[in-house]
Amino acid sequence: MRAESQTWHAAYKDNRLVARRASSHKRKLERLGVLALPRDVKLLDVACGTGEALHILRDAGFTRLSGVDVTADADLAREPWLDLKAADSKALPYADGAFEAVMCMHSLHHLGTMEELRASLHELLRVLQPGGFLALIDHYDSPQLRAAFWGLQKPWLTWPSPGLRAFRRQHEEEWPYMYAYLDAWPGVRAMLDALPCTPVLERRGAFFFYFAARKNT
């Protein structure tokens, strides 16, 4: 899992981007089936960032929430309802089968090379109990996504919108590993297909794929 720079974190926490993520995360959690889980499910959010998804889950009545990120957000760490740890996704600090649900939203492309991503997915499944619920969402390679990213890199196209300018600043640091991830997408897809899980949702939107599954017993 990559530790992004302070510049990246400052752009990521731009109020416009925080509001944009908060407005879309509930819809994505619904699509993944996470919001349909029992409210007392023991759930881990891997690469949880500043915790927008965790806040939505808490507001929805979930009571046993944990989050892990390579850098623990200081504000999120002060929340008494959350167990937050700083750790790498390739070495999660939890026992085997510690959680009934594990999710990772918009962060697979942050987890490193294909081998590092494979190791991280192994860890997500290791800490998930048999029959547990796995939920993933991230970009997939497509012409429309490549076109959107091309435009996002052009200052003259993003200048009219403060939100797009902030989004471009956030992504400036991500381009090298984002494109490496997209170039490797067929391998990522094959990696997901090979997981010892039974899929319950496989769906593509315009820019994201949604994957939810139950770990095989």
Image (cartoon, helix red, strand yellow):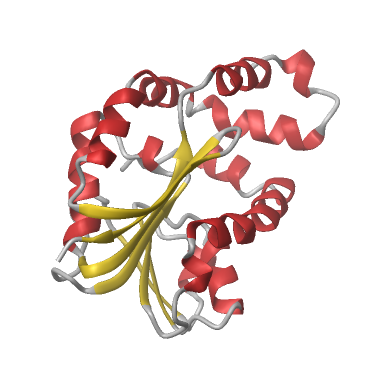
Q: Quadrant of the C terminus?
A: bottom left
Q: Quadrant of residue 100?
A: bottom left
Write the residue at 49% across / 63% down.
Answer: 33
Examine the rendered structure and indicate whether residue 18 appears above or below residue 160: below
Q: Is residue 125 left or right of residue 174?
A: left
Write the residue at 76% across / 37% down.
Answer: 163
Q: Is residue 215 visible?
A: yes
Examine the rendered structure and indicate whether residue 28 appears above or below residue 40: above
Q: Quadrant of residue 190?
A: top left
* Spot occupied by residue 101 in the image (x, y as percentages of width and height): 34, 68
Q: Quadrant of the N terminus?
A: top left
Count of marks, rendered view: 0
Q: Is residue 141 left or right of residue 26?
A: left
* Spot occupied by residue 111 in the image (x, y as percentages of width and height): 32, 40
Which of 60/22 is in front? 60
Examine the rendered structure and indicate whether residue 15 appears above or below residue 194: below
Q: Is residue 117 visible?
A: no
* Spot occupied by residue 65 in the image (x, y as percentages of width and height): 41, 76
Which of 189/59 is in front? 189
Q: Residue furthest right?
A: 160
* Spot occupied by residue 53 in the image (x, y as percentages of width and height): 54, 62
Q: Is residue 204 left or right of residue 115?
A: right
Write the residue at 66% across / 58% down.
Answer: 22
